[in-house]
Amino acid sequence: MTRFFLVCVLFLATLQANEPSAYDFDNTYLFDANQTSFDENITQDENETPQEVISYYAQKVLYLNYKDIPPRVLKGEIFSVTLKTLATIKDYAYIRYDLINYKGVEPLNDIPYTAEGDKYNYDTFYFLATQGEIRLPDFNASIVTNEPIRYKSTLLKGQDLNVITLNPTKKYANIIANDFELVEYKTTSYDDKHNILIFIAEATNCDIKSLHLQNVYKQGIESIYQSIFDSRITYYAIIDKRIENFSFSYFNLKKNSFSVINIPIIVHDDSVTTQSDLKPKDQSRERLKMAIVAGVALFMFVLIILTKKYAYLVLIAVPVAYIVYISAPSKEVCIKKGAKIHLLPVNNGTIFETTSSRYFLQKEGSVKDFVKVKLKNEKIGWVKNEDICSY
């Protein structure tokens, strides 16, 4: 009897444990009649209305495949990959892409350029080849709707690409482009041994920021505009004064060969450099000229006094005026505190110094919107007109 009583007690305890409690009922998983899958971690909050509940669907509504993929790319090239997409539902806002697990490339657009077809859409992504080995990203695509509904995402695996590294010429400027053209250029004197060349160039399908010239003293970007398709750059290079024609090459993707850019060196008088290591000019010749003129003036003065022909004293005014002109200091301009000193008279160009206080600096010249000044450390630079003090 005792054994039979124990068995009955255990059986009743088991039944009670399997009955749903109030707690279990309040946490029943949410899904609707059309749902084929649900997230076990999603529960309905007591403050939520039924419209705020997101439904999760496991059926596949988006299909991806490669439409256009390059057979090979050059290291440093901008290239495109086009996907063919098919959605089995019509009412959706857009397709969201997550690009993951890529190697040797820099994605240039997260949102694709989309061309719509009768049945398929064609989504194009652009990449910059940065290394000698490339794996395209995995494209994880999700349909985004205006309703509180989430569909299963679709994953298109990335592929390895054949990468070619160029064997460039000695004058290669590290540029790969469909086209690269000079818009304008100018050369001025930098110091006794160098000239400064500044040019503006435009390119298509080009990583123009990678421009780098060979065998120059200094170089850099003054301003740049870059997009996937069209780019523009203002660039300077300090070159040897003996160079009469400066040239460099780039790889032309249309011609599949190197193209050469030639720039004739014609030096203009108006220097546009900082001449950051420029030493003060040798004033010995100016002093010699002043000494000669002063000697002539003194000789004429003595001669007039001895001959007592005082009417000729007016002739001394000419050498005296020349001496005053040479010895007179250059016109000074007032520069505001915080003014930026530019390397070249170019907007958004290189700034090599910022004034810490109000300055009076020697004016060397001017061009549109800029004044050329000599700093107290003998550097030469350009200041915007807006940074000149107004009285």
Image: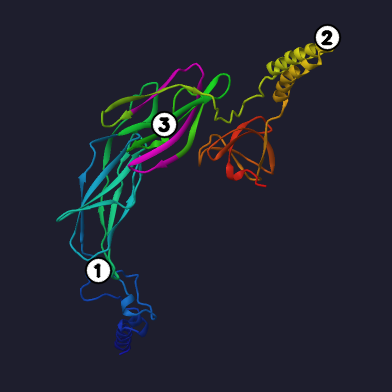
Q: Where does residue 229 sit, x and y in percent of width and height?
A: 32, 42
Pick the front one: 357 or 325: 325
Front one among 348 and 113: 348
Picture quadrant where residue 324 is located: top right
- Distance from Cα at disc 3 to Cα at disc 2: 63 Å
Q: Position of residue 331 (x, y in %)?
A: 67, 33
Say what amino acid the circle numbered 3 marks: Glu
Q: The magenta stretch spans which residues?
A: 224-250
What is the magenta segment's predominant secondary structure?
Answer: strand
Is residue 229 found inside the magenta-colored segment of the image? yes
Percent of width and height locating residue 111: 32, 53
Residue 225: image quadrant is top left
- On screen, residue 244 above or below 370: above
Q: State the residue lying farthest toward the left.
A: 118
Q: Upstream in the sequence, badge 3 or badge 1?
A: 1
Colouring style: rainbow
Residue linked to disc 2: 307
Name the secondary structure under disc 1: loop
Which numbered tag is attached to residue 37?
1
Q: Nearer the viewer, mark 3 or mark 1?
A: 3
Residue type at mark 2: give it: Thr
From the image, tell me which residue sits under label 3: 184
* Residue at 74%, 17% in the rendered image: 315
Q: Secondary structure at mark 2?
A: helix
**Looking at the image, which residue is at 58% across and 19% down?**
192
Frontmost of labels 2 and 1 is 2
Q: Nearer the viewer, residue 388 or 63?
A: 388
Q: Is residue 86 magenta?
A: no
Q: How many marks?
A: 3
Which circle's residue, 2 or 1, is located before the other in the chain?
Answer: 1
